[in-house]
Image (cartoon, rainbow, N blue to C red):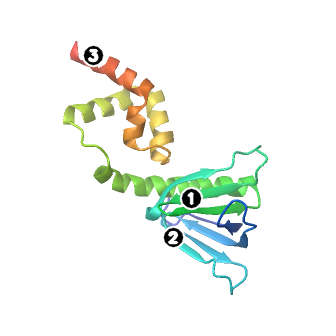
């Protein structure tokens, strides 16, 4: 993944899902998104740093909705409607990478304080369980869940407690 990775696609910027949208071009990099409307007099120009985006959602392919990418920030959302699902998928993937990059840098400050034994146990569990490691990567690295949310899920708690008991008995 290079730092110059970017995507440029035609899209409509929508303030709500019912809004017909402002046609233009969205440019995504690993640092920010820029939306330039086709109409130069439009006030719907955007330049947003990904550090301000909290999460993202998108339309599932095959649904009866258009290909939307919804970027959630503290005061609302930026909604983009793409011309096709392949365009949405390209942009969604890049947003996921960008958000995970920014989430990792802020996570240490916002996450719970763990004991060194708890942290060691989590790391060891991820190293030894490829399915759990893959799930962690899909959910946490993509920004869909925080580290705390991931480890708080019941199934992971059960695996963690069993592993902890097993590790103590050795």
For mark 1, does the 10 Å Cα neighbourhood hold few (<14), some (14 to 19), or many (20 or more) residues? Answer: many
Q: Which residue is mark 1?
A: 71
The kind of secondary structure element at disc 2 is strand
For mark 2, does the 10 Å Cα neighbourhood hold few (<14), some (14 to 19), or many (20 or more) residues? Answer: some
49 relative to 63, above or below? below
State if disc 2 and disc 1 touch (CB < 8 Å). Answer: yes
Q: In the rendered view, does 124 fall on the left or right side of 170?
A: right
27 relative to 87, above or below? below
Q: Which residue is mark 2?
A: 48
The kind of secondary structure element at disc 1 is strand
Residue 58 x/y as whole percent: 64, 51
Give me the C-alpha separation between circle 1 and circle 2. Answer: 10 Å
Residue 76 x/y as whole percent: 54, 62
- Decide which of tag 1 and tag 3 comes sooner along the chain: 1
Give me the C-alpha separation between circle 1 and circle 3. Answer: 41 Å
Q: Which residue is mark 3?
A: 165
Q: Residue 41, can we see it? A: yes
């Amino acid at each position: 993944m290079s730092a110059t990775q970017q995507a440029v696609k035609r899209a409509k910027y929508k303030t709500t899902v019912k809004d017909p949208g402002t046609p233009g071009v969205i440019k995504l990099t690993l640092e920010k998104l820029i939306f330039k409307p086709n109409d130069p007099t439009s006030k719907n120009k955007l330049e947003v740093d990904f550090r301000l985006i909290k999460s993202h959602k998108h339309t599932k392919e095959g649904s009866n909705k258009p290909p939307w990418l919804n970027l959630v920030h503290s005061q609302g959302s930026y909604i983009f409607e793409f011309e096709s699902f392949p365009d949405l998928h390209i942009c969604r993937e890049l947003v996921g990478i960008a958000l995970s990059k920014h989430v990792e840098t802020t996570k240490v400050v916002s996450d719970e304080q763990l004991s060194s034994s708890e942290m060691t146990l989590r790391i060891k569990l991820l190293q030894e369980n490829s399915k759990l490691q893959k799930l962690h990567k899909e959910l946490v690295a993509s920004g869909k869940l925080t580290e705390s949310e991931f480890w708080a899920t019941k199934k992971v708690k059960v695996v963690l407690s069993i592993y902890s008991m097993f590790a103590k008995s050795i």
